[in-house]
Amino acid sequence: MTLLRKKYVGIVDFIVILSWFYIYFRPLAMEKCAEYINISLYLWDENLYWFGTYMSASLVLILQLGVFVNYLYSRARPYSINFEYLNIVNNFFIISLFTIIVVIYFIYGNSIFPAYREAGALSIAMPGFNFIYPFIKFTVFFTLLITTFLFFTTKRIKYLSYLVILIFVLLIMGRRGLLITPLLVSVFLVGVHLKYSNGFREFLSFRFLIVFLFLFLIIFFGKSIYSKTKLVEKTQATVVPDICLVVKKGYQEFDLYWPAVISESKHKINVLDMPVAILGSFIEHKNRLDNYTNFYSVTDKTMMKYNYESYYNLKFGISPNIYQFHYYYFGLFSIVVVFIIGMVMGYLEKSIAVSFFKGSYFKLYVLYLTLYYLNSAMDFTFKYYAFDIFVTVCMYLVWLFVTKIFKINK
């Protein structure tokens, strides 16, 4: 919808496109790829599965409609950018990122690489890393975002070199998830820039093909670069149909998660549980699971029932997507809630573009965090959202200090 009206692909459009994998592709391939998919991963009930699939297909359209309604009232704005200042900012984030990587290597050694790391979530395998990770996420976001933007707009090969090196380093560290959203946001911002600079045909350029190739490989095959499990070895030795190979390596199993979510929701409105669940996210993992059952999030309730060992001991599990989350708390009223969220996301998306071209990068990051927080299981992710805001303030203070010392102006 955004592409037809605004002539560029919006951030929410990318979110929707990625959701097509588990809303349409996996369900349609379910019968053909049944032997390659563990349908009993959480709770299997065919009726609940298809009900959830139809709910996802309906709610994703409602979300898009909300975004589209917001864009109906948008006005075209002329965008310009100070490339000299942008390059200075990029150098600051590159230096910050690699400084942080060097520091964590001295602290954790080879444990930063999956092959040398014990099983479990990072907060278990690398104690204290959960406090450092938001700083890495922050610097990776801007380094990827600005480097990709500069590669498109200046056509200089050095920025492609930076991009390849950064992607390679993060993949061997097992941080595939950090790569996807910054690349998507950068493509969105390049699209806005090209529209207002009358360069829309550049979308068909070789540079866009390179970035989309990166995205495809990272999303669907990134895990293979650093995985060392027997499952991967078996997959490589087994002849798997191409469609099923993508199904196995693609986006998360949200479609298979629907029966568990619906079963726990018991078809009632659970909205009054949400504030307590948000507070519960600040309680330490095992302490919350053992002693504060009233503070459980949707993730806690479903994982403790259907994925106990991995979730309790290793913090491995899955959280509901935006549609499952709101269905659990609001039932069928989630149709209205998701529509409103779509309108808010449309506003945030436009504000992100405005902030980037005005050079308000820290404001951009807060807007970006808010948009993706709305697209998450908000009862489970609020503490991460709050800490990310704190990290943004810290990095902003560092940037103010750097600009004062080196007398940097926009």
Image (tube, rainbow, N blue to C red):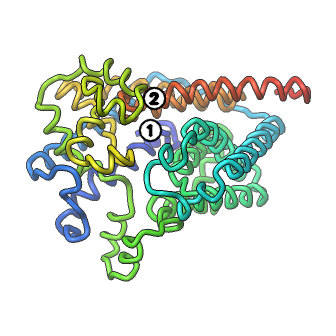
Up-down relation of residue 401 to residue 42 (above or below)? above
Residue closer to the observer: 395 or 196: 395
Q: Which mark is residue 346?
A: 2
Instruction: Identify residue type, mark 2.
Output: Gly
Q: Position of residue 193 (x, y in %)?
A: 65, 40
Q: Quadrant of the N terminus?
A: top left
Which residue is found at the position 43% from the left and 52% from the top?
120
Which one is earlier in the sequence, the residue at label 1 or at label 2? 1
Q: Is the residue under label 2 in contact with that under label 1 (CB below 8 Å)?
A: yes
Would residue 269 appear left or right of 397 to someone viewing this image? left
Q: Secondary structure at mark 1?
A: helix
Q: Which mark is residue 12?
A: 1
Circle 2: element type:
helix
**Residue drawn 36% across and 77% down?**
234
* Mark 2 crowd level (few <14, some 14–19, many ≥20, 10 Å Cα): many
Residue at screen point 53% across, 58% down: 117
Quarter of the rendering containing residue 52:
top left
